[in-house]
Amino acid sequence: MATVSSWLRSPCPALVVDAVGAVHGMNDAAKSLFPEQVVPPQWRHGESVHVAERSYAAHRVDNEDGSVTWWLLDETDLLLERERAALLARMSSALMTSLNPERCMTVVAELAAAHLADEALVIAPQSDHGHPVTRCLRGESPTYELQHVDVEEVVGLSEALRGFPPVPSRWIDPAAAPGWLAQDVVSIVVTPLPGHGVPAGALILIRRDKHFTEDEEAFARLFASRAGVAISAASLFTQQAVITDRLTRDLLPPVLRRYEKVELAGRYRAAGDTERVGGDFYDVHELPDDELFVVLGDVCGKGLDAAAQTGKVRTAVHALLQVVTDHDQVLQALNQALLTTDQSRFITTVVGTVRPVDEGLRVTLTSGGHLPPLIVRANGTVEAARTKGTLVGILPRIVTATDEVLLAPGDSCLLYTDGITEANGGPLGDEEFGEDRLRRALTACGGMPAEALVEHVHMLAAQWVGVGTHDDMAVLAITAPRRRSS
């Protein structure tokens, strides 16, 4: 009797079907589930049975008298959790598809409107021009705009934007919702979007036909936690990209302006295909009396560390030219500055002063351990400037030698770094481009404009390297313009 009594009072619904297929008995739980006459079940063992908006797994137990007892195990909550887990996984994958904050907010709003509510709003922290707001109605395209909203008008919104726990929906009066939020609302959920140490914004879910349950609010918080991390990651990435771009902009060689009496052109290519900056550089500074001071150099190393040192060198040269323009004095002062700040990094450099004269351009060149500039005459003759010197940034005092060349109309002076001559490639892939090959190539460049000259040299080196690795490359051409015939 005890066994029968336990069976009848079991919380798990059970039905007994006799040998001829008729329902012979039910326990109390089954009677509550099936208040009316029950049609003999045609279930299979393990089959899911849907009754009264719930799901049960049917388990068959064969009895000795030929009857069958069917136990119905409620698996509604388990299936719901599985569905939600799968949904969260799909949502997380979708959220990781973009590192653009606006796009990420759009994805969050679309997912929330499709799976959690009739309408969803994603509100980011206030910027200078208002709150970025993404709104999405189920089945429609989301909208994004900057809005000036009073977050205090929505209960819990200001707290959510500061990262505080959500206010339960039952505490929010939909009738008090401001016009900019929504109208004809039945239930509202406001939950924070937690980011990486700082709030990423707030998520507002709106329903117009039924209230949110506590389980649905808990699931919304799980979704919001993943959405907040995604939006925060996108915002951090964007901030870092903006900072990197602004810093990189100052490290890149300048855009050379046009001068009436001097043609200038430069080309730069960093060592890595994914890098924008490196250790090679060039600069042009304007001096009184239409003179120009040019500098081209190569910092030991490559990549970001070399680029940072390049920035220091360029800044130092710019500062020195405010008080001195003599080549030897500039290089000596630069040498002392490098010895003081970082003895592990030296540079090679060549500086020049360009002065327009009646015959063309008079160019004074001084080297600090750098390759001598090449003079390309209009007739194709190529010669090296007679300048040399010691590396800058290693010895307490450097030794320099200065040369002065006259560029007639159509002549050019080419300054370049060893990334050109030491470029490895060619037919076998392991041969240096070399200075001799460069000189032979330049014999066909006589009379070229500065822009065409640097483009040609840069193209030759790039073709020689092919897809192989290479060092930083920098080229600067100074050309005496051809005179226009009257």
Image: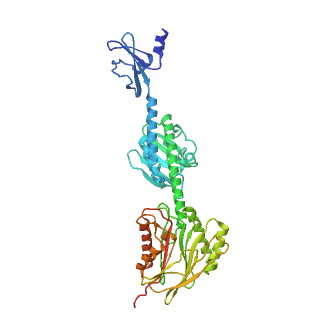
Hey, which quadrant is residue 328 in on the image? bottom right
Task: Give the quadrant of the C terminus.
Answer: bottom left
From this view, report whether residue 114 is shown above or below residue 55.
below
Look at 45% across and 77% down and name the residue there.
439
Whether 83 is drawn above or below 423: the answer is above
In the image, taking residue 445 as reference, residue 290 lies left or right, namely right
x, y percent for residue 74: 44, 25
**Residue closest to the far left:** 20
In the image, residue 15 sits, relative to residue 74, either above or below, namely above
Residue located 66% across and 75% down the image:
397
> Which colour scheme appears in the figure?
rainbow
Judged from this view, the residue extending furthest toward the top is 1
Tell me if I can see residue 322 in this picture.
no
Which of the 4 image quarters holds residue 311? bottom right
**Percent position (x, y) of residue 376?**
46, 81
Residue 207 point in image, percent of width and height: 44, 40
